[in-house]
């Protein structure tokens, strides 16, 4: 049955492309389809990924084991219609859910390899949260916490809106036990006049505890996060 589907698929593509090639004019889509068929005849199968994956290297390895080439095309322009042909051919040869199953395996391999390390914020399923808060990093929790460390006579305060204000880009790690570590300033923007603010951030940020840690596959993990901390001057 699968062989019959493959034959019908190839006949359909060949018929369509022959019809247009006779006119001497082929669209980019038709050229992509033809290239896909030509590659298949040479024994080439090619999976084109259109979205960022945290497990790309694992996915590439698993596809290679099946004799399938792997490429990334996040904007969907480099392989116009070629990818549609290849997707169809891969499904015919390996089954409709082949790629989805492979992604699950690749993601599991990725997690097992790094579960005791530190993940970047874009690799986790859920960000670290404050208890009773569904906002990323607890919304303004960090800002409010830092403001509590200011003296009553302070000439500035911390705010989250960085537009048209001096600001710091800070990075910190929340470990799987919910504690903050490795606080540092990654970027400074017009903050030269606020040395006290920088000292407070670096001194206090790692004292924050009681996070609900980030998760991958519903398991707590250690992860790095970044956020902007702006300065609003009272002068």
Image (cartoon, rainbow, N blue to C red):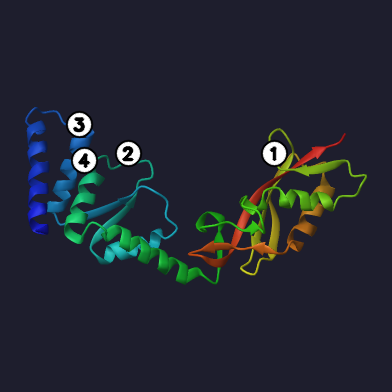
Work out how far the residue at label 4 is from the one at label 2, CA to CA, in angstroms. Answer: 11 Å
Q: Earlier in the sequence, mark 3 or mark 1?
A: 3
- Residue 80 to residue 199: above or below: above
Q: Please rate how many residues cluster around mark 4, counting C-alpha atoms within 10 Å: few if below 14, some from 14 to 19, many from 20.
A: many
Q: Residue furthest front?
A: 132
Q: Which mark is residue 162?
A: 1
Task: Tell me the quarter of the picture where residue 58 sits.
Answer: bottom left
Q: Quadrant of residue 235?
A: top right
Residue at the spot of label 3: 27
Of callouts 3 and 2, which one flags the residue occurring earlier in the amino acid sequence? 3
Counting residues from the N terminus, which is met first, the one under dot 4 or under dot 1?
Answer: 4
Mark 4–mark 1 distance (CA, rounded to whole Å): 45 Å
Label annotation for residue 95? none
Circles 4 and 1: CB atoms closer than 8 Å = no
Near mark 1 (Cα within 10 A), the count class, few <14, some 14-19 or many ≥20, is: some
Cα distance, mark 3 to mark 2? 13 Å
Q: What crowding class fits label 2: few (fewer than 14 Cα within 10 Å), some (14-19), or many (20 or more)?
A: few
Q: Secondary structure at mark 2?
A: loop
Position above or below: 114 against 145? below
- Which of these two is toward me, 136 or 117? 136
In the image, what residue occupies the spot 46% across and 67% down? Answer: 111
Residue at the image position 18 percent from the left and 46 percent from the top: 36
Distance of label 3 from label 1 (alpha carbons): 47 Å
* Residue 48 spot, x, y in % from top left: 30, 50
Describe the element under mark 4 as helix, strand or loop: helix
Q: Which mark is residue 32?
A: 4
Quadrant for residue 76, please give it.
top left
Q: Is residue 26 left or right of residue 182?
A: left
The residue that disc 2 covers is 77
Marks 3 and 4, the one that precedes in the sequence: 3
Q: CA distance from mark 2 to mark 1?
A: 35 Å
Q: Earlier in the sequence, mark 2 or mark 1?
A: 2
């Amino acid at each position: 049955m699968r062989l019959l589907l493959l034959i019908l698929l190839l006949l359909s593509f060949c018929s369509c492309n022959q019809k247009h090639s006779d006119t001497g004019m082929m669209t980019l889509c038709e050229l992509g389809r033809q290239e896909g068929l030509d590659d298949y005849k040479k024994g080439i199968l090619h999976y084109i990924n259109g979205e960022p994956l945290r497990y790309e290297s694992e996915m590439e390895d698993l596809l290679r084991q099946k004799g399938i080439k792997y490429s990334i095309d996040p904007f969907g322009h480099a392989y116009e219609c070629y990818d549609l042909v290849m997707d169809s051919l891969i499904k015919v040869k390996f089954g409709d859910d082949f790629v989805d199953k492979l992604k699950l395996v690749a993601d599991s391999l990725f997690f097992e390899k790094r579960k005791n390390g530190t993940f970047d914020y874009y690799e986790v399923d859920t960000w670290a949260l404050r208890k009773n808060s569904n906002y990323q990093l607890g919304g303004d929790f960090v800002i409010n916490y830092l403001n509590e460390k200011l003296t009553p006579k302070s000439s500035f305060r911390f705010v989250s809106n960085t537009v048209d204000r001096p600001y710091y880009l800070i990075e910190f790690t929340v470990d799987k036990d919910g504690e903050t570590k490795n606080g540092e300033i990654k970027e400074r923007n017009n903050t030269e006049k606020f040395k006290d603010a920088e000292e407070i951030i670096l001194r206090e940020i790692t004292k924050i505890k009681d996070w609900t840690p980030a998760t991958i596959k519903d398991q707590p993990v250690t992860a790095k996060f970044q956020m902007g901390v702006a300065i609003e001057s009272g002068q």
